[in-house]
Image (cartoon, rainbow, N blue to C red):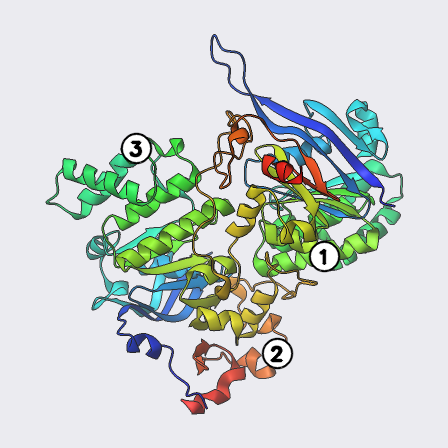
Amino acid sequence: MKTPIITIENLQKYYPAKKKSFQERQYVKAVDDVSFCVYKGETFGIVGESGCGKSTLCKSIIRLIEPTGGRVIFQGVDINQLKKEEMRLLRKHMQIIFQDPYASLNPRMTVRELIKAPLDIFTDDSEEEKMKTVINMMRLVGLNEEFIQKYPHEFSGGQRQRIVIARALIINPEFVCCDEPVSALDVSVRAQVLNLMQEVQRKLNLTYLFISHDLSVVRYLCDRVAVMYLGKIVEIATKDELYNNPLHPYTKCLLASIPVPDPEKVRSHSPLEGDVPSPYNPPAGCYFHTRCPCVQANCSLTYPSLIEVSEGHFVACHLCHTKEV
Amino acid sequence: MVPHFFNEEPYLEQGMKNNLEVKNLSVSFLIRKNWVQAIDDVSFSLYQGEILGIVGESGCGKSVTSMSILHLLPETTSRIDHGSALFQGQDLCTLNNKAMSKIRGKKIAMIFQDSMTSLNPVVSVGKQLVEAVMLHNSGIDKQKASELSINILGKVGIPSPSKRFKEYPHQLSGGMRQRVMIAMSLIQNPDILIADEPTTSLDVTIQAQILELLRNLGKERDVSVMLITHDMGVVAEMADRVLVMYAGNVMEVADVKSIFKNPLHPYTQGLLASIPRPDVDVKSLFTIEGNVPTLTNMPKGCRFCSRCKKATKRCEEQKPPLFTFQGHQVRCWLYENSKEDN
């Protein structure tokens, strides 16, 4: 019934740390052994705190950075085996939207040039056809056609993100990676962009990989959600399951940490003590055991594997595994 | 019928005293040789021991309000057009620099958003704290100031404070640095603490810790806190009263429960309806169409009228004053008729 559009198997990205004399070189495991698949037409969310490797994961999935190990299978093709030219052609089907719409638009290009650029690269259409496509796309994302000759600095943050979205969607990709697309935007503009993303997803039948640190936004937009902590996925579940029945203690703490915009639901104390451990030197055993409120003896010994505890709900926690047995 | 009350009354009844009173404050900036008004006619009171949340989107003037009270805006390109900020019988707006420097940091302290840029990277945390103590207390010696600093580092929840005392800002994590900032601002026992987006650059789990710390220390020391933020969740959790700003105007003031339960101003209503919730499923988000007007291009009447669904011709032409309605102060013509009730 559901067909995966992209499958990620044991993906790893290690960055070398500075080597000290007489010591072996150490690696920061930014993404460590991550596996999941994204189904066609869904929005798959990845949440986690800063430094947990969500952006690295996103970039290594679409091969903007070369992963250290593992496989990414996009529509039956292992993209890490592709040659440069084959990869370039495949990019037509996968696009990315970055967080900062100020940094991701060339300030010297007009809106027309910006949105048209992917067409120049991937299609042989005539200029006239290209212009028509550009104008249609601008209408779709809610940009006034009169803006076509303007430069990015003349736009507000929300409008710039619309330009970025238009540019990503103009060559009809099937799969779009969104790396914190609304984090730089104000509340009222954020709602506009979120609704726009939902609308174009329905119209163009897109699949999103949506990366965010904001659990409220993820709840609004995503169908399934993965929670990351220090480079590893600790829990994957459908949205309803994750928010109503979180199993991993980290997910529980994360959910309890968000301030709820309702003064009658105020919590009395912060649920989690301490800081995220340094990724250079993660704790032995489960990475979360140093902060975990329900830590057990075996937590500091072995890292728990990601096990399916109920249909579609995967958890990496010794606690949940023993309960199951 | 429930009697209408002015918004000051419930606090005065409990014997709360007015710690800071800002009246009709207007601040302008020099942009391309023109003076452009950034905040216009901002009035509010800050009561003893309360947390006043100031919310609004970027550019609405929430930071400018606090910075101008403390004279932290550049003198050459900004000016206070009119208005006053009464604090302990003095008008802060008319104070000279010397008098102001005695209040700033001692009686009114401030915490900024980015702790990395507000701490000096080449001076150890301890030295910076000691400096803060010695600056305002001439009688104290270095030894005593160090003890005091280590003591307060422990109070803000920094583990092994005497070790951290000697460390430099880059050796601390973002959450720890923000704790140092809080320690530094509270070390003088200020009457007012202005926290400008204190947790915006932090992760949610760390944010929860810092907010808890701020709340507890504020209550313990009976400090009045002005909490400036764009996050409605943070406001709901922390504030006693809320002030909503839009494009340099105060749009609505009310206590926290009624602002979330019964927002009156169309902007507040739209703002609340456009936040995705972490605790409940939202089918479709409400959107406020359009963008915030720029400073150089403000509408003549109500500043929200171009995006307001309930706007009438009058809204475009005439700027509404703050009306008092159901305990809220609200800047909207919709509540004009309630004026007779008061």
Label 2, secondary structure: give it: loop
Name which residue type carries label 2.
Answer: Lys
Instruction: Identify the image quadrant of residue A89.
Output: top right
B94 left or right of B207? left
Residue located beneath label 1 in the image:
A196
To which chain does the residue with label 3 belong?
B
Name which residue type carries label 3.
Answer: Val
Rendered residue at 26%/71% (across/down): B17
Tell me the CA gap for discs 3 and 1.
Answer: 48 Å
x then y, percent, for residue A205: 83, 50
B145 left or right of A151? left
A307 left or right of B178? right
x then y, percent, for residue A68: 67, 22
Is A317 rendered above or below residue B202? Answer: above
Residue A155 appears in the picture as rendered? no
Tell me the CA gap for discs 3 and 2.
Answer: 55 Å
Label 1, secondary structure: give it: helix
x then y, percent, for residue A113: 74, 44
Specify the quadrant that holds the C terminus of chain A: top right
Sequence order check, earlier mark of 3 and 2: 3
To which chain does the residue with label 1 belong?
A
Instruction: Identify the image quadrant of residue A208.
Output: top right
Label 3, secondary structure: give it: loop
Residue located beneath label 3 in the image:
B123
Instruction: Identify the image quadrant of residue B167.
Output: top left
